[in-house]
Structure formats: C-alpha cells, structure tokens
Image: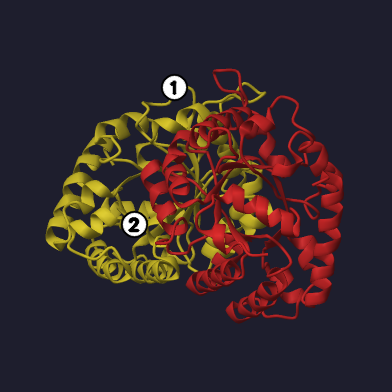
Chain colours: A yellow, B red
C-alpha cells in the first residue's frame, strides 16, 4: 500500500487508521536491551546496535504499520546510540513505517517546547511521527508539545495508566475535584481533542495499559484520540486483556509488544512469523 | 581546591558539600535555547552550540561547583547535540565541576535500568554525577536508578514539587493513605536514604521548588538528602524564597538558575560577575 499521498498531510491518527487497514494494529517495539543483543549473538555495543537495526528495518518494512522505539535502549550508547536511533527512524519512515518514539519526555513549558523541537516536525533533530510524554509537571505544561504536534500532523501519547503495579498509587491519587490523576488526564485529553479536531479522531492520545482490567470510571470513546497499549506479552497483558480494556473503541488501540517478539530473532522469517501470530491473535480479539 | 581524592569514592552528597565550601551553593544551569544562542550572536545550530559550550566550560571551571545541563536543549540538535552534551559533561568533570543532567527520565523498572546504564557509572554512554528522574510510573519503579546511583556514588533527584503552576493539581493529589503525591515522595525518599546511608546525608535527592512557599506539611530535614531548587530568577523564586522554603536545612539546597545568568553572556567576565552576584545573594540569604 502507498501512504505517500497522506504521509505528510494527514494527521497521525489518520495515518494510523490507514496503516492498520494494511498491517493490523500491532506495534513492533524495538527495545535493544543488552539481553536481546546478546541473545541475537551481537555485541552489547554500538556495532551490535547497528546490526540489530539492519535486521529490524528489513523485518518491519512491509510487515508492520508502526514501530515503537524505546529511547532508553539507544541512549545507553551515548551519541552513537542516538545516531543509530536517528538512522533507524529515518529508514523506517522512508519505508512507510510510522515511527513512535517512546521517550516519555516532560518538563515545564519552555523545556517542553525544546523537546518538541527535538522530535516533531521536519526541522526536528530527529523527526518521528509520534512521541510519548509524561504529565508529572502538569497537563497544561504539555501545551507546547500539543501545538507543535497539531502543526505538523504528529501524534502525542500522554502517559496515563502504566503497565507496572508501582504506578498505581500515583495514577489513582485524587485531586481536589474528586477525579483520579488518570481520570483527569482522560478528561483533559477529551477536551483538547474536541478543540483540535471537532468531530474527528484527534491528535492527542493516551498511553493506557490493559494489565489492570477494563476502566470502569473513564469514558475512553469520548477521549477522542488513540490509545497506545504497551506491555502486551512480556509485561503481562494478553490479547483478551487488550480487547476487554478497549471494548468500547477497539479500532483506536495500538497494542505494542517488544520482548516477546524480539525473542524470536534475529532470523527475519521467524520474527515475521512471531509478528504474524501475535498480530493475528490481536486482530481476532479486537475484531478490527 | 582539589576534589580528586574524593571525586571517585565519595558519594554525590559529600562531593556537593565540598564543592559548596569552595564555590557556594549556586548551580549554573546550562540551557542553550535558541533565544540564548541568538542573543550571544551564535547560530541556533550545532556549531553555535559548540561555541556556547566553549564559553561556558571556561566560565564554569573554577567559578561554580555544579552545572545543570537541561537535556532538551541539546536533544534539539539530534545526535550532534548529544555529542556536544557529552563533550560538555566530560570537560566539566575533568575541570572538577560536578555535572547534574536534568533529563527527567522515568519509565517502568527495566527501562529505568537502561536509562541508568546511559548516565550513571564509568561504563555509561555519558557519565554524569547526578540525574533528575520523574516518578509518574511510581517511586518503586525508580529502584534500578537508586541501585545504580548507590553503587557508583552518583546522585539522583526525584522530581517532587515543580516550579510551574501547572504541576500543582497532580503533585497535590491525594493517595488512599491521605498523603499528597509530593508528601508521599518526600516520605519515600526519607526511607530510602535512611536505608542507603543511615546517619548520613543520603544519595537520593528531591527536585523541590521554592515558588510555592515554604512546605507546611513536609519534613524536609528528615528526607535525609539534597534538594535541587531550579527556577531561581527567570521562573520567579528569589533568594529570600529559597531561604524561606529551606529554612530547616539551608545547607542541603542546590539553587539553580539559567536564563537570568546566561542573559549576561557571552562575555566571560560578565558571566562570572552575574554568577558572583546571585551566588552572593543566595549565600547571604541561606547563611551557608
């Protein structure tokens, strides 16, 4: 399929819808940990990282619609790792694979503007199609990310409900309005999307994991954007968990897996088989 | 003064105490925004960044004990910006200036371990003396940072109370135990420091701003570690605000300023004068 006509003009949500039609919803997480590099017979060093990238680019193009790069695993190797990350992002984008950088950046507004310069838009240091951001310094402080994403048709995913149990106490703490931190974020995102893209799927998504059961007190449909759901496989959410969590909007979820897929590398055909198997399970469970 | 004998063996808190005796508590924030680079007559590009770094290294060595590098402003230039950041960190450390990287990283445990690999210890991609981290995914998920920092004598600063007003709703939300998010973090840090460094100043610090008045419901002394207090000057906290906020532990605060100091560049002697003036105000207000 050709995304070229929409790649630069349509927003991330529209591009994801097109990519899902061609490849299904599964996002390939590219987390080159020391364990993965060693298991693939590669050095846990910049050269090993570059050989990992050569393999995964070959596998991803034509097989998945979206890859998720976890920044930490590239930062391990200093500037050389970031240079490799930049190459990976560029080669995927040339091959029509959407690149989501999982960097969980977040700071005060002026600093968030600098992070936006780093990753969003054609003048960015490393241009990606979508970015994860962290709201500890306040949803309203994310505004520079939102403005830049809307301007350039990029996607943003605000970390809301994480897969790990350690995140529950903070994410369920309640504000003066009686809403939990995660409820308030879903509500704030709904308002932002309704303003940025009235009547359409908006550019502001949520990182929302399926490990903690379906949300009983949040309106996911009304949020009006996409949901990135990491932690499928290794961190414990099954395809059925994902389907149950997003029963109200199964077409808006990007389930992401990394370790459980990369464990089948480095043989490209085995990696593609693993992608195909998990992708099939998810498509069947989600019904999209 | 010579820090060489303690630089590699003493923990960050001890090294800061030594540095403060020589240079006072003021931390020089190095945030090369486009506005600053242009105001200095430099290009807002990798070459301009390198020339900025040449100036600030010359100014910092022998004039301040700690520099704070805001990662976003280097990430703007992709891998070249990170290569420049690595050079800046290395040159400061060779010149006996402690390097604090304000990166506000934070994720699930396994990813935090990779971020630790990136910045803490002699095998890191870019070794720094201290790192800021964000607790949105849970205090307990920060454990890999804590373990690595304790092993290598590095410092960690957990973002607790940010300078911006947008952060207040989340940071004051209350958990099931009745404690606010920021109260719980101070309490968790106290426990971690009492375990890691019983009877001494511990390695786990807090980013705690003085803009919102003195904390009335938190025991800062009992936290047992250092406080990084950014936002002095441009973001609104005065030397008197800093002194009032940390009245119970004035010797444990690292007040940090960037824009208000860099505005006096690029002339090195004017920069040193600005450092000296604000540093003097802070030393007088804090009485240390």
Q: Chain of mark 1?
A: A
Tally the marks: 2
Residue occupying the point 81% across, 57% down = B279
Separation of residues labelled 2 and 1 (CA atoms)? 30 Å
Task: Tell me the SS state at disc 1.
Answer: loop
Q: Is residue A61 above or below residue B285?
A: below
Residue B168 percent coordinates (x, y)? 69, 35
- Are there few (<14), some (14-19), or many (20+) residues within 10 Å of tag 1? few
Residue found 50% across the figure and 73% down from its top: B83
* Vertical placement of residue A49 versus B41, above or below: above
Residue at screen point 34% across, 71% down: A91
**Foreground pick, A66 / B208:** B208
Mark 2 and mark 1, same subunit?
Answer: yes
Instruction: Give the quarter of the image for residue B180.
Output: top right
Say which residue label 1 marks. A216
- Mark 2 or mark 1: which is in front? 2
Q: Secondary structure at mark 2?
A: strand
The chain to which mark 2 is attached is A
| N-term mark: 2 or 1 | 2
x and y percentages locating residue A13 in the rendered image = 45, 51
- Residue under numbered circle 2: A67
Q: Crowding near pointer 2: few (<14 within 10 Å), some, many (20+)?
A: many
Q: State yes or no: discs 2 and 1 in contact (Cβ < 8 Å).
A: no
The image shows residue A65 at horizontal and vertical percentages of 31, 57
> On the image, which quarter does residue B107 sit in?
top left
Determine if residue B8 is in view: yes
Residue B264 visible in image: no
Q: Nearer the viewer, residue B20 or A249?
A: B20
Q: Is residue B88 above or below residue A246?
A: below
**On the picture, is A76 further left or further right than B21?**
left
Q: Which mark is residue B232?
A: none
Which quarter of the rendered picture does the N terminus of chain B lie within? Answer: bottom right
């Amino acid at each position: 399929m050709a995304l070229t006509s929409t790649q630069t003009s349509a927003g991330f949500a529209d591009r994801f819808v097109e990519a899902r039609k061609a490849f299904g919803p599964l996002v390939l997480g590219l987390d080159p940990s020391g364990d993965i590099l060693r298991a693939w017979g590669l050095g846990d060093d910049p050269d090993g990282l570059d050989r990992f990238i050569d393999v995964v680019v070959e596998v991803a193009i034509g097989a998945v619609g979206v890859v998720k790069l976890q920044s930490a695993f590239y930062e391990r190797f200093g500037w050389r790792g970031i240079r490799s990350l930049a190459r990976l992002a560029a080669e995927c984008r040339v091959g029509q694979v959407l690149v989501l950088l999982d960097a969980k950046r977040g700071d005060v507004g002026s600093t968030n503007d600098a992070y936006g310069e780093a990753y969003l838009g054609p003048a960015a240091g490393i241009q990606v199609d979508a970015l994860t951001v962290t709201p500890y310094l306040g949803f309203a402080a994310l505004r520079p990310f939102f403005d830049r994403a809307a301007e350039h048709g990029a996607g943003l995913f605000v970390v809301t409900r994480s897969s790990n149990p350690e995140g529950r106490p903070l994410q369920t703490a309640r504000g003066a309005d009686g809403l939990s931190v995660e409820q308030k974020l879903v509500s704030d995102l709904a308002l932002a999307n309704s303003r940025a893209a009235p009547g359409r799927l908006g550019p502001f998504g949520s990182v929302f994991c399926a490990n903690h059961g379906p949300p009983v007190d949040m309106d996911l449909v009304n949020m009006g954007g996409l949901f990135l759901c990491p932690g499928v496989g290794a961190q414990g959410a099954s395809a059925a968990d994902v389907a149950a969590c997003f029963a109200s909007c199964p077409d808006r979820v990007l389930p992401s897996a990394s370790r459980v897929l990369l464990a089948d590398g480095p043989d490209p055909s085995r990696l593609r088989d693993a992608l195909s198997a998990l992708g099939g399970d998810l498509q069947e469970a989600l019904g999209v």
